[in-house]
Amino acid sequence: MNAVDAFRKDFEELDRAGGPLKELRRAGWERFKGLPTTGEEAWRFTDLAPLARRPFAHGRPSANGVKSAPSLAPGLVFVDGHYRKDLSVLPEGVHVSSLAAALREDPRLLEGVGAPGEGEPFVALNTAFLEDGAFLRVAKGSRLPAPLHLLFVGTTKAAHPRNLYLVEEGAEATVVETYASAGEAPHLTNAVSDIRVARGGSLSHYRLQIEGESFHFGAVRARIGRDARFVSHNVASGGALTRNEITGSLDGEGAHCTLNGLYVIRGTQHVDNYTRLEHRMPNCESHELYKGVLDGRASGVFTGRIHVFPDAQKTDAYQASANLLLTDTATVDAQPQLEIYADDVKCSHGSTVGQLDKDALFYLRSRGLPDAAARHVLVRAFAGDVADRIGIPAVRERVDRILSERLGG
């Protein structure tokens, strides 16, 4: 049995169970046409053959064996994509719950959310296995008093968590998603976060991928309303093969979107970052900066597209990708793209791939720093453009620890 056969078997079992989401799941399965191949433009640098040979069984809440998780204060814990009430600490004064519980109250919650692109293979597969995830609603004019922490733990199964964040008019929130592994065994994570930020609202979204030997596919789809603000911080250091997709649709005049990304990988790890920003209305801004640090025989991909629609005059959009190769065997393929159909815009993009500056390394060595420490100083300075933008001290410290661990101390 291969991966697609396993998906089909588990979907048929879930379909027989029925329920109010049955038709939505069936629609997702119809859109899923199998695993993409390198013959497709959007996937030509990411070979999914290793996943195709791994038939991961669908994770069940009663069969994951996880008895504890790192403490969150407050926060929700999900194991193999299913909410674990016994491991979670619900924050007070906030409308947050598992998505399964929210959908039982209102099965229409998922209507009209998420940016365009529902046909993407792993979003479609996530919809086919839609059961649980996190649900957050921030009421009009209110503010989340503290960041909401969400921990997703994978074991040996396939997990398809679906998260939904609704930030109403003038509301503010910060959400931190952390994806980790319960052990060393391979597993599959296929997560989707649908986000809607209404007029004048603001959401800061953090996503930390620190799993072990996982196949990780993460999609973030944000719809940003008039004068609303969405800021994404995406950090990846784990997983054997990772594909992150972020789509931001600037749907209202004066909308603002910022995408900050950092990936730090080694060995034979592979990370593919795919972003798409859609400017649909006038006077909107987007700023994007992705950086990669690659060691060993690691490989990275960055594909970023800024799409400016005809009505989106006075667009201000900037995109940059910078990558640092610590060995001669690490590789990066970068494809920044602009697609512009308006004539009164300010748009730019750029991409760089390079190695440590030998003169700078020699200077630090000549001042008494050992080679490892000198390299660490230079790499931290390179990553600092992204790491220092992280507004939560605990998250920023975690990113610094990741850099230290990846560089050997």
Image (cartoon, rainbow, N blue to C red):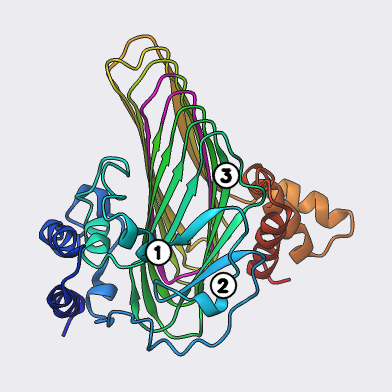
Q: Residues within 10 Å of mark 3 (few under 14, many from 20)?
A: many
Is 251 part of what is drawn in magenta? Answer: yes
> Measured from the top left, where is residue 87 in percent x and y?
56, 77
Instruction: Give the label on residue 88, or none.
Output: 2
Q: Is residue 309 left or right of residue 79?
A: left
Q: Residue beneath label 1, please?
A: 133
Task: Find the distance from the CA under tag 1 to the CA under tag 2.
Answer: 13 Å
Q: Amino acid at mark 1?
A: Gly
Q: Residues within 10 Å of mark 1 (few under 14, many from 20)?
A: many
Q: Earlier in the sequence, mark 3 or mark 2?
A: 2
Q: Which corner quadrant holds the N terminus?
A: bottom left
Task: Find the distance from the CA under tag 3 to the CA under tag 2.
Answer: 19 Å
Q: Earlier in the sequence, mark 1 or mark 3?
A: 1
Please tell me in which quadrant of the rendered image residue 250 appears: top left
Residue at 67% x, 70% y is: 405
Instruction: Give the label on residue 173, or none.
Output: 3
